Amino acid sequence: MSLEGYDLTKINKEMHLLIEKGTIGKDPVLLLQYSNGFIPKEGWLWDYKKDVGDDRVGLAKTILQIVSFHNTCGGYLIYGVEEVEKDQLFSPIGFDPAKFNQAKIRDLIGLYTGSKIEFHFDSIDVDFLGDTHKFGILHVPKRLKNEPPVQFIKRGPEKKNGFIFDVSDVYLRVADECKKSEKPEDWQLLYSDRDIQEVAGIDFNVGAKSSNLPHNLPDKHLICPKLIGREEIVSKLWEWLSDPFEYSKILAGDGGKGKTSIAYHFACQFVESPPYAYTNVIWLSAKEKQFSGFGNEYYELKESDYSSSETFLAVLASHVGRTSTECEGIALVQLKKLVFEGLKTFPSLIVVDDVDSVPDEEQKRIVDYCRQLGGENTRFLITTRKKFAYSSDLCIEVPGLPMDEYIQFIENQERRYKIAPITKKDARKMHVATDGSPLLSDSILRMVKIGESLQESIRGYKGQAGEDARDAALSKEIGALSVDARRALLAIVYFKSCSKTELKQVLGYEKLRLQDCLEELQSLFLISEPKLIENESRFTTSATTSMLVLDKKSELAFDHTQLEKKVRELRKGVPFQKKEGNRKKVGQAITQAMAFLKDLDFQSALDTINSELKNQKDNPDLLLFKGRILFDREAPDVAKARSLFRKSYDLGQRKSLIFDYWFDAEEKSSSANGMIEVAGHALREQVSDKASWHYKYARGLIIRSRARDGVHKVDDLLEASSSLSKVIRDQSAASRQLRIQESNELHDLIWHFICDLDSISWISGFDYINIMISNGDSRTVMYQRAHSCLKEVRAELSIRFSDKKKEAYDIKVKQFKNILGSRSDTDQNDRPFDDLLVGLEA
């Protein structure tokens, strides 16, 4: 059946006027009459019903429809209409008004929502083609502008796929559906004027459209040109507006995750769709400069609005009608009173951005002032890197972008920066490297833009090229830590993942002192907490935090070397007890999974292991085997496999198989630190084929050195040299020559850096050469290089003499003579090196 000949705009207009008047009678029914039935369309303002349900489920559905219409534009429920042909034919069938129990429905509305909705019901008789039909008509009024949306305070009856509605749900009418409010646009609609011409895109000039609020928001290009994702957090902010008790909200998270962008986006939406009674949006920021990951530099913003709790109150007063003369020189309590009175006159949304830029005590005072000054139509939205000790009702934590939103973000940045498309696989690698941070991701994209490959850019970001971005994201937090908390943080990074007990044993802190440290670290988002293992909390850090902490280890703990040694020793001696009764089940599961693997049925093998893991989730043998399946299958899940191998090891797994698989997974993930870690574990566990593991350890060090600079680069290469020397000693004659050649090439590279880097003194260079000679490199050129280092030191003494340096030089000369004299008699006869001893005395 066609709608031709019917003007739906006109019908909506007339229906809207009937709702506003509260009309109960034939008019709404006659308006919808069409041929021998009704217009075959339900909409924003009306809904057809065959009958009214009188059981718990039917009544709850009626409540849901009434609440949805009331929250939106109001509407009519018309009873006695049957849908004969879907979306084509709605026919009158009559209705028994005795079935509609108004008192019961009013009581249930109060029970389920705690609110009162003044609906009205009546029955009417209408003629259709000579037949008279009885209808029930229910009028639902539109919620008043000054009333918050009605929400459910009690769970509704259960249906097949859940509950009809749940606690805290807010519903609205969208076209012909009753919809739960979940997206920002849903909340914007609820807090708007809800004119039908706007919500339904109908233009019939009903009332005046709402105008944007006055505001002082900064230019969006400085803050947030386009917000990707974050719908869940923005929706929580809109939902917060209906909270009758909490007038402040904090967006908290570590740097670079997008707190300011979220606050700005919400404020813009608020300006466009202002809730009733608000007159202003005020933006106050303590931030004077912003770091650009893509530009790799800070750019200046306008002068900060506040730098203390007192200046915060003063600038807020100026935005709510108070003059500087009124505020100057008055007591703090009086200043707060002036602001409080001003906010009554100018009810506002106030965004307090970057509050962590002021000292800790001032931050706390500002947050307290916001809570004291807030009211029904005065809301404070605060952004900070520091998580205050408040409940989740006050604080919304802002993590990195989830994977699906991160891919959207990367696609947007590709267009913005005109970068070639990045595959989803590579985007996932970036996500892991940056913890989903938009700021840090831009740091990688900057290097891609100038011609680096993505892999080189990620490696560069992990090294010196990403230091500025990491510092911008985290250095402020780390710098604010107490001495004890810094040392605890470094220990956690050394552990990679550790339990509270392990941390206590390494640090030597008593229980209360350790708890204080952990609370301090958690408040600054430097620690995440994975699932509990054996009923004890475990702690870890993000990849970004770990890189920054290791860069600054000497600043974080005076005993960082001893601390790392203690961690290694404790890791080596971690006890693990198996439960005797579970061994048989584990063996059966692994045996069955192995059989499936032989048939290349990876899914069945995985299902078998997962089935037993439900009973023994922390069994290291099952975890190892599951990781093996995920790694070996046709489409390997390397990230998940790595996680399983690490967890299996942490739980006590020491079979050589875990080290082989784990190393391959780290290598496939291009993680040099992971390769070093696994090879180090394997060597400490005395696995067979030590030469092979020394070689893998050296490979990891060499790969990591490419992303490092200065002394750190050379230290990695020198440690690789020591590992290669152990390989050479254990190799057969056929392989030894190849390894010697690799070792010599490595030593030549180290010599190049000794000569090229100003950060390495000639005294240190001599020590490096000495180590390489002791590692087995007895080429003539090595002794000549050692001699060259000493000559350079002697030349420096002739220019600027120092007793301390002269003493060090004399010691090195003596060492050099001992090195030359410790060679075999045959070697000394063949290579006397008399020329290398001439002129060394100062």
Image: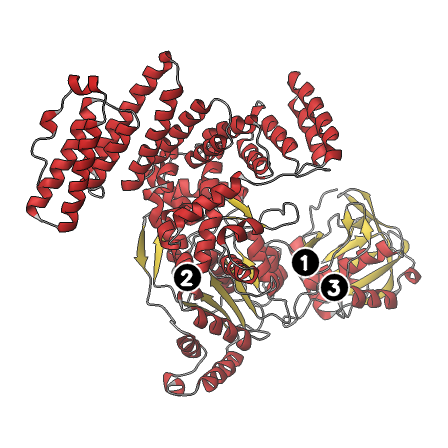
Q: Are marks 1 and 3 in contact (CB under 8 Å)?
A: no
- For marks 2 and 1, the one nearer the N-term is 1
Q: Name the residue rendered at 16%, 35% in the picture.
A: 789
Report helix, strand or loop for mark 1.
helix
Depth check, front residue: 112 or 539: 539
Please report whichever mark, 1 or 3, sits nearer to the chain's N-terminal start. 1
Looking at the rendered structure, the number of numbered marks drawn on it comes to: 3
Whichever of labels 2 and 3 marks the residue nearer the N terminus, that label is 3
- Residue topped by disc 3: 153
Residue 603 position in % (x across, y down)? 66, 25
**CA distance for labels 2 and 3:** 42 Å
Q: Quadrant of the N terminus?
A: top right
Q: Which of label 2 and label 1 is nearer to you?
A: 2
Q: Amino acid at mark 3?
A: Ile
Image quadrant in which you'd find residue 695:
top left
Discs 2/3, front: 2
Q: Residue furthest front?
A: 825
Which percent across, then down, holds residue 791? 11, 36
Q: Nearer the viewer, residue 567 or 63?
A: 567
What residue sits 46% from the left and 56% below the top?
261
Image quadrant where one finds the C terminus: top left
Give the alpha-carbon distance from disc 2 to disc 1, as whole Å.
60 Å
Quarter-wise, where is residue 816 in the image? top left
Pointer 2 residue = 480
Residue 396 in the image, given as x and y percentages of width and height:
56, 59
Mark 2 neighbour density, 10 Å: few (under 14) some (14–19) many (20 or more): some
Q: Which residue carries the number 1 mark?
A: 12
Q: Amino acid at mark 2?
A: Ala
Foreground of the two, 594 or 339? 594
- Mark 1 → mark 3, Cα distance in angstroms: 32 Å
